[in-house]
Image (spheres, coloured by chain):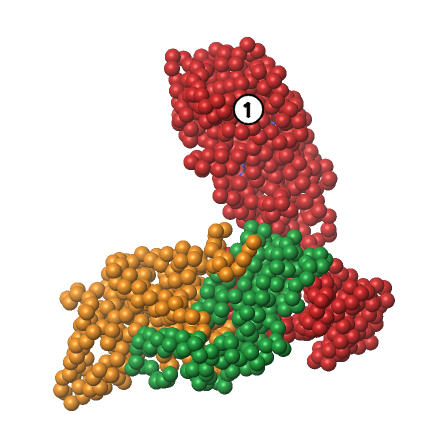
Amino acid sequence: MKRIGVFVCWCGFNISGTIDVKAVASALADHPGVVVAKDYKYMCSEPGQAMIKEAIAEHRLSGVVVAACSPSMHETTFREAAQAAGLNPYMLEIANIREHASWVHPDDKIAATRKAIDLVKSLVEKVKRNEALEPIHVPMTKRALVIGGGIAGMQAALDLADGGTEVVLVERDSHIGGHMAQLSETFPTLDCASCILTPRTAEVGRHPLIKLHAYSEVAEVSGYVGNFTVKVRKKRTYVDWDKCIGCMDCMAKCPKKIPSQFERGLGIRKAIGVAFPQAIPYRPVIDRDACTYFKTGKCRICERVCSVGAIDFDQEERVIEEKVGAIIVATGYDLAPKAKFGEYGYGKIKDVVDGLEFERLNSSSGPTEGVIKRPSDGKIPREVVFIQCVGSRDVDKGNSYCSKICCMYTAKHAMLYKHKVPDGQAYVFYMDIRAGGKGYEEFVQRAVEQDGVLYLRGRVSKVYEDDGKVIVRGQDTLSGENIEIAADMVVLATAIEPQRDSRNLAQILKIGTDQYGFFNEAHPKLRPVESMTRGVFLAGCAQAPKDIPETVAQASGAASKVDVLFSKDDLVVEPLIASVDEAICSGCMWCEPICPYHAIEPKTIEERVGKKSVARRVASVNAGLCQGCGACSVACRDGAMNLKGYTNQQIMAEVEALCL
Amino acid sequence: MREYTASLKREAERLLSEGRVKTVIAFGPGIDPLAPIPAFAEDKDEASDLLVNAFSAPGLAKYVLDEVGGVEKPEHSVAVLARGCDSLGIARLIADKRVQRQSVVILGVHCDGVIDRGKLLALNPAFSRTKNIKSVAIGEDEVFVEAELADRSAVSLRGRPEDLLLDKCLKCLERDPVVFDIMLEPEAGTMLGRETGPTPVGDRGGVDQGEKEKSLRARRSLVAETEALSSESRYEFWARQFERCIRCYACRNVCPACSCRKCAFDVPDPEWVSKCTWLSEQFMFHFLRAFHVAGRCVGCGECERACPMGLPLSLLNDKLMKDVEEMFGIEDPHVPKESEPLGFYSPDDPEPWAKEVSEG
Amino acid sequence: MSLEPVGDTSVLAQGRKDLEAGAAGGAQEGRAGGGGEAGKAGGAGEAREVGKAGEAVEEGEWAPKIVGFACRWCSYAGADLAGTSRMSYPATVRLLRVPCSGRVNPAFIMRAFQRGADAVLVAGCHPGDCHYTSGNLFARRRLALAKGLLEYLGMEPERLQIHWISAAEGQKFARVASEMSKAVEALGRNRKMREEI
Ligand SMILES: Cc1cc2nc3c(=O)[nH]c(=O)nc-3n(C[C@H](O)[C@H](O)[C@H](O)COP(=O)(O)OP(=O)(O)OC[C@H]3O[C@@H](n4cnc5c(N)ncnc54)[C@H](O)[C@@H]3O)c2cc1C
Ligand code: SF4
Ligand code: SF4
Ligand code: SF4
Ligand code: SF4
């Protein structure tokens, strides 16, 4: 037998001024299943709560309805009181007769009272069907995986490791640092990028709590929040990094020179070696496609010069397994490919370069040792045209978004150029200048006012080569004039795009991407560093284009989210989640695509039918992932999927009571 | 309908003797030559009794569920004869993961339509004494039936398709199977099947687009007529229909989209629909039946054919199918796909209620 | 309406016949204000008079009964805000808290009409703002179909309304409640699909 107690609060005059609380209590006293119905001035007060507790004991109540203010105010208070009196907290429900009745129907006391009675009855009917629920505890592995070792991934890894959390850092490239390692100076302060980056990469490299897998990729992720199993594929370096002591004799002696990717093709490297002198880990990799031995079967010079015998031409790819409880995705960005920008001569005209190439030309450790020389003939350019928004805010090129940082780095480039070539002229074609950020607008103003950079508002229509010059044609939309500049060099601020394989990684991680391939945050405003999958967090340009300060802030945000997750002994989840009645479930799995958290999976159960045992598929809900939206329960036609706390039975009963 | 029985038998015998399947589901002679019944052949002898002809009315899809459905690893496979509508139903069961593709060998057959025994008898009651169907020809504008009667006399009839074919065949959406393993060939002499291997759903040979358009138009115009009525008249219309429903659940039982282990209508708690047949429960029942197949109904018309009370159930299904196509841009909504229309969304989905509700 | 067993009659033709009869019946009713064929058709003894005649009798007593499903994150909180802002609206809407508009099964809506609701409101977060990102988008699809079907079965469009109401839109909640109330009052008591009362 259900034994329900109803407690009607006056809330001083807030409720009782409009609603006849006595009438509500007495109407409910007659309701089937209600064994006690009382009213009191302030239910949430100590004496009010005591009244409820006593009644629970005295009447051996199986459920309680408190008719009072909105559940968002005191649901927790009353549930705790119920628990203190030995009643399962989920056996208590709130009927909202203040915000939803007394306060909004002040002029119609009879109608308000009737409505209040209906609301309370409806919750009594619900509570009769409530089920005692216990919070669900899920054990956790307090270890984090960070994917991508750019500034975002490094920051997150360091924050976590400094706080005592073990971190597995997986970097696809042979070294960490990401794009920031390629930058020369950084806006808005113009401090040298490697000066701020190198100490960090070194710290990551030697941190006892950071396990770095460079030249590796995440191949597979299974499990769920607190309990992921990650397969990391360690690509073949052909060098045993454990034996190698980093003397780089191999690199010095290797006869094969190839264009360096790190230098964006503007410099050269060897078939074996590191990308740049400060690379962490400072361990060589053989570029199989370039290596003479792999091509012709002869050479093996590196093997001969290596004093520790670390070269291993027969090395196999290895897959290792890591167990982690949380994942931070920080795989960064890629620049829009050259092939997209034929009209700007990019890829055809040597002296048309992109932003990162210009960074390398500027870098004191770059191929020109920081002297700005144009790629075609090494001459110092006298006139340089910078073009912004190349491929950004451009629907035809598939990117309608703003790449956000190009305005700033173009101003930086133009400024750096003027500092190095004071008598040269820098032109910038722009659509708008977006310089939101601390000290950013001032930075751009400085480029214009102090360094005399000429900003031209408009789109470039054509770029072509003529007699050693790069001719840029465009229109200044402010003056309406057609402009033609015979430049020595053109720098394109090409769009920041997601990594080409971001959708693939999204699939592995079961997180979403937007239409472009940037990873989706769980909520654009309130949960910007979480993904839709619990336990997977986002940082840096992998989520959307952003500059270094923002990247670092987001990375620290993600790290502290992981810390919050790990701060508990185990994962405690509210029991208001979906559950499957396996006896009914048909295994159609139409509920599966509905769940935004990928909490539903097929599972096979064995069943005895007569003497035989048959296997049958049913849906199963992962308690660690389900957030209790209930959308799946409606997709399920036979009602096998139900939502605890809001079951079909409960809602139907509430509806019926409201209509009577 | 062209003659496929010989080819069916041959394929059935082959599949059974090769041990590829345990059962072949097709038709066999009933008591009444005008009403062949579903038949299940397990050996050569039984296979030699199989048939398919222009009077083979029942759909066969749901039998596949009974034979090999609902389990992870069925002990054996079955073969099933499939006309367009049967194949849609089988594809539905596969898409709903109730039947596994590899456990069914689909014997596809072209279908020109099935003769409605009731309609034929209404036109000429003499056919009720049929001993033997001698010939049937179903053309676009004319249907011809000739039979030998019990007294050895012959009777024949020529009529319009509307007057002789099953209603579901008059609005047929697929005359050829949308999924099959073996296509049965009709030519005399080479009565052998053409083994094509499993085809993906929707990869069919020639569909007569013109005919499909005609069927669709017929369906849509009835829906449009209904939509054009006032709310009151529509309510009255449906009330009159639903009042007749005896809740025999034949519509559900034959429906290939109704394959739940335990149907919502049989679940005691919550009681979605009570067993009472008063009008309000009838509305609930029919609303839910239609809504539960919304986006998954294959338009096979089996529900309507099976209903002993003649409820126009297609008029409900077709409305939803039309809405699914128009609102969510789903092409060929009757053909089962990898995802069902209610299983995904688009950020630009329409809000057909905006019109009567001010948002200002 | 004759109830000949089928088997030898065309369902399609029968459907057409019924449609015509329905249309005629409806038109007749419209003019006569209830009764007609419809009145006699009540097989299960249902009070199914439609039109205005029935209402007039009980007008004084009657106020619309509107069952509202509100998602707890947005619309329920929006209604709370209407309360804390002391906006006043008619006491006709009774809200039921669900986690998300995606939890609203069309069967719940039907059940409300069966048991005597004069209208049903489903309120959820604005598309794009769902606490669970996509619940209301699935709800939008389902409800688009369900509402279409409900109207196809004869329910007046105004009786099932879907509104996106955010936690900040107390005002909108109050307005929706008032407008819905007014619209339903104009339509009168719902008798369609409803159990005998
Ligand atoms: C020309 C130019 C100039 C710029 N100048 C400035 C400036 O002056 N100031 C400023 O604040 N910002 C500047 N930026 C922006 C700056 O580069 C970014 O904000 C910053 O690099 C973002 O860091 P990140 O870690 O998110 O991404 P990235 O730097 O792209 O790092 C991502 C890392 O993840 C690795 N990775 C990718 N995919 C995988 C995978 N699947 N598995 C494992 N590892 C993977 C990559 O190899 C890389 O190491 C500039 C950008 C450009 C293009
Ligand atoms: S819970 Fe329902 S929807 Fe999900 S697989 Fe089972 S029957 Fe299908
Ligand atoms: S209730 Fe929501 S979150 Fe939980 S399994 Fe269902 S759809 Fe996923
Ligand atoms: S509802 Fe009717 S037409 Fe649709 S699939 Fe089921 S039986 Fe066929
Ligand atoms: S087959 Fe006809 S009578 Fe039987 S339940 Fe379905 S609609 Fe009702």
Does the rendering let one see residue A412? yes
Q: Which chain is green?
A: C
Is residue A231 placed above or below B222 in the rendered structure? above
Query: Chain B: what color?
Result: orange
Mark 1, ligand 1, within 8 Å: the answer is no
Q: Write down the residue under mark 1.
A: A410
Q: Is residue A246 left or right of residue B211?
A: right
Which residue does the image show at 42% across and 36% down from the upper left? A396
Identity of the residue furthest to the bottom in this view:
B151
Q: Nearer the viewer, residue A217 or A314?
A: A217
Which residue occupies 49% across, 80% down? C49
Quadrant, the N terminus of chain A? bottom right
User: Where is residue A422, by image quadrant?
Assistant: top right
Q: Secondary structure at mark 1?
A: helix
Is any part of residue A493 visible from this angle? no
Residue type, numbered disc 1? Thr
Which quarter of the picture shows residue B52?
A: bottom left
Q: Quadrant of residue B5?
A: bottom left
Residue at the (70%, 44%) spot, across then down: A563
